[in-house]
Amino acid sequence: MTRPQNPIMIVLGTRPEIIKLSPVVREFEDRDWPYTLVHTGQHYSDSLDGVFFDQLAISEPDHHLGVGSRPHGHQTGEMMIRLEPLVHSVDPSFLLVQGDTNSALAGSLVAAKADVPQGHVEAGLRSDDRRMPEEVNRVLIDHAAEVLFPPTDEARARLAREDLDQRCFVTGNTIVDAVRQNELVAAEKSAMLDELGLTPGEYVLFTAHREENVDAADRFADILTGVAEFAERTGLECIYPVHPRAREQLVSKNLTVPDPVTLVDPLDYLDFLALESDAAIVFTDSGGVQEETCILQVPCVTVRENTERPESVEVGANVVAGTSPGGIVAAGRAQLEATPEWPCPFGDGNAAERIVDAIAEYLLEGPRREESPQERTV
Ligand code: UD1
Ligand code: UDP
């Protein structure tokens, strides 16, 4: 297919979206397709935002909506208000969102209202936990989007249960592309292990930032206790790069961080990948980190009650531990025994290519919609 006439609009706003959409942006660049990058401003601290544009070598956003931190409805609404006129003036041929953030939801809803065809990267993930803002977002986006890019057959099957699988392309997850594109550079360039005085295979990497975990003082304290107890019992050091949401909660709730846990600022992608690759084990509530550990053959314990990444559990890379200290320690001990020889269920690192191929097919052939009742002849 030749290049689309009007640009593809990519709407993003947070750390994981920048990382997971970087291979897609690179694919548009390689094909010399016109695209325009819109940043909602949901993440704005350099350590969650600017550093990733620099390091992943993607160009600065063409448009910045500057929305910043606000309560969920206000944040999503403000993004829509600022995005809608831009969509009308750019008149994109297609709009692309990724994942389950408020930024992705705002992009999706504006596209639906403006009748711009849209695609959802990482479609079909479900935790079945509607208390999570992300679960509500991903369900709504999947139902609004014309074209869905589930990363796995399992995600496609979830879409089929909601009658959404007629317009699906199973692509793999673009996080595999991102890891493959950056892991060697990380191993060569990152000096983070030395800087932190860590020995490969002799430390725990820990991340926690989910609203339902860190905004609840008791639960956050339980998680910290469990991870610290595991580190103490196994004699491993523990590094926690702290997301600003979690940092704020630690301070405002006056939580004590137990001794074996060392807090550091959020890391850039290469430093984080380097730390992840050489960790003995990772404890996390992050979606992307569950996937990356599985790709990097590092055992993972998820400090949540559920996961929308069951594939990582099925291959033995990940265990869902809950948030009680005892459960976390037990799951950590079991995972430490795991032999990291599982297959990668998230694809082969060519997801971005498949996504852009599918957009090309869609733009060429138009929507594969069922006949509407009005079109049916009687
Ligand atoms: C958001 C996503 C979450 C994703 C995470 C990735 C939603 C509903 N949540 O959560 O799914 O896993 O991003 O990291 O979209 N803050 C800063 N600097 C920033 C951004 C935020 O200090 O650049 C602080 C602010 O105090 C803010 C808090 O972090 O109130 C939460 O930020 P927000 O973007 O609302 O949610 P995240 O927890 O980052
Ligand atoms: N990450 C990073 N630095 C850090 C912590 C995480 O670069 O200090 C990366 C990590 O490699 C993964 C992504 O951020 O690709 C995950 O983002 P996050 O945990 O914020 O969000 P989620 O995936 O849970 O939506």
Image: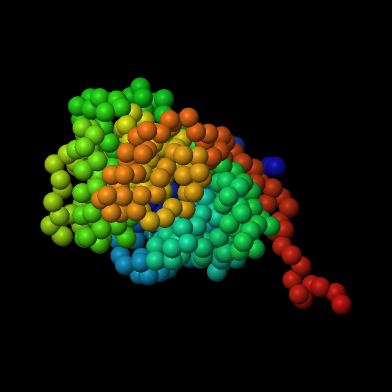
Q: Nearer the viewer, residue 174 or 106?
A: 174
The image quarter in which residue 188 lies: top left
* Residue drawn at x 21%, y 60% as measured from the top left: 217
* Residue drawn at x 49%, y 33% as measured from the top left: 342
Measured along the vertical axis of the image, is residue 309 above or below residue 176?
below
Residue 318 makes an appearance in the image: yes
Give the percent coordinates (x, y) of residue 299: 39, 36
- How many discs mark residues in the rendered view? 0
Residue with the most extreme right position: 378
Give the percent coordinates (x, y) of residue 73: 37, 70
The image quarter in which residue 232 lies: top left
Give the percent coordinates (x, y) of residue 361: 69, 48
* Residue drawn at x 55%, y 60% as measured from the top left: 142
* Residue drawn at x 15%, y 45% as measured from the top left: 258
Give the percent coordinates (x, y) of residue 145: 58, 60
Horizontal arrangement in the rendering, residue 39 relative to residue 149 (left or right): left
Which of the image's four quarters has the N terminus?
Answer: top right
Horizontal arrangement in the rendering, residue 151 relative to residue 166 (left or right): left
Q: Nearer the viewer, residue 88 or 146?
A: 146
